[in-house]
Image (cartoon, helix red, strand yellow):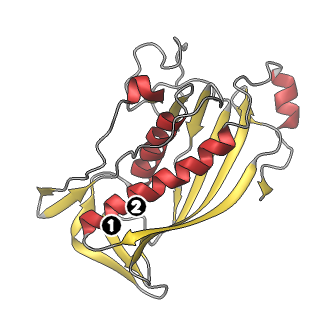
Amino acid sequence: MARVKPNGLAGAGLTRRNVLAGGASLGLMAVTLTGCASGGAALYTLAVVPGQPQAGGPRFVEVRLPSIASGLDRDRIVTADSGYRLSVSATDAWSDSLAAQIGHTLAGDLAQRLPGSGVFVENDTAAADPQAYVDVSISRFSTGPSGLVELDALLSVQPAAAGAPYGPGTLQRITLSGAQGGNTMTMVQGLSQLLGQLADVAAQQLRQIPPTAPTDAAQAGGQANTPHANHR
């Protein structure tokens, strides 16, 4: 991972895409989503949604690129999951890989909720040693059998020091549902809202981690083999 010397929370010369640091660098992002025609496909993107900013949490947080179920990990948008059959749009596509979109949207959601933390995504070109990692594994991200927008994920929050996890973390299954899926625009907007709710849970767990990590790298390394997460 490329690293720069932090300058405050945002770091020197970092873009909002590379390090999303609190409300100062994030600002307000539109919740309304837009699709555009490109090569016969309408392209859609997820958006950051407002949350409740609160104090506390690590100085730097790294959101690792999410793990996406193979059935969802495609350019064309999966519009429905009946449990036995996936419906894939013939005309609507994601504007970027789904893992990258979820990762950056979740980072933006967390930055808005943790204004004292610098939040960035794994493999961003500018980053700093994090004091916490956020891992997400997505198994459902579409309209479900009931017609409601649904998100099913495993969420892990792990404290870190010297670039490595240490100590006990948390592992939690998150199952969320929202409004009726409707068309693709409505579904993507609803999925953005559910990611915001996922960020609410992650932010609450991150606030339990001290703002600074242990400075003894040997101690952190010695604890790296402790259980990665505890089921809650």
Which residue is disc 2 drawn over? 191
Residue 207 visible (yes or no) = yes
- Marks 2 and 1 sit apart, C-alpha to C-alpha, by 6 Å
Residue 118 in the image: x percent, y percent? Answer: 53, 27
Residue 21 visible (yes or no) = no
In the picture, the disc for residue 187 is: 1
Residue 7 in the image: x percent, y percent? Answer: 51, 11
- Element under disc 1: helix
Q: Which of the 4 quarters of the picture holds residue 57?
A: top right
Along the horizontal axis of the image, is 182 left or right of 159?
Answer: left
Question: Which quadrant does the N terminus fall into?
Answer: top right
Along the horizontal axis of the image, is 129 left or right of 109?
Answer: right
- Element under disc 2: helix
Kind of residue indicated by mark 2: Leu
Along the horizontal axis of the image, is 39 left or right of 96?
Answer: left
User: Badge 1, how many Cα within 10 Å: few under 14, some, many 20+?
Assistant: many
Q: Are marks 2 and 1 in contact (CB under 8 Å)?
A: yes
Residue 163 in the image: x percent, y percent? Answer: 68, 29
Residue at 58%, 54% (x, y): give it. 136
In the image shown, does 230 or 74 lie closer to the viewer?
Answer: 230
Residue at 11%, 59% (x, y): give it. 39
Along the horizontal axis of the image, is 154 left or right of 225?
Answer: left
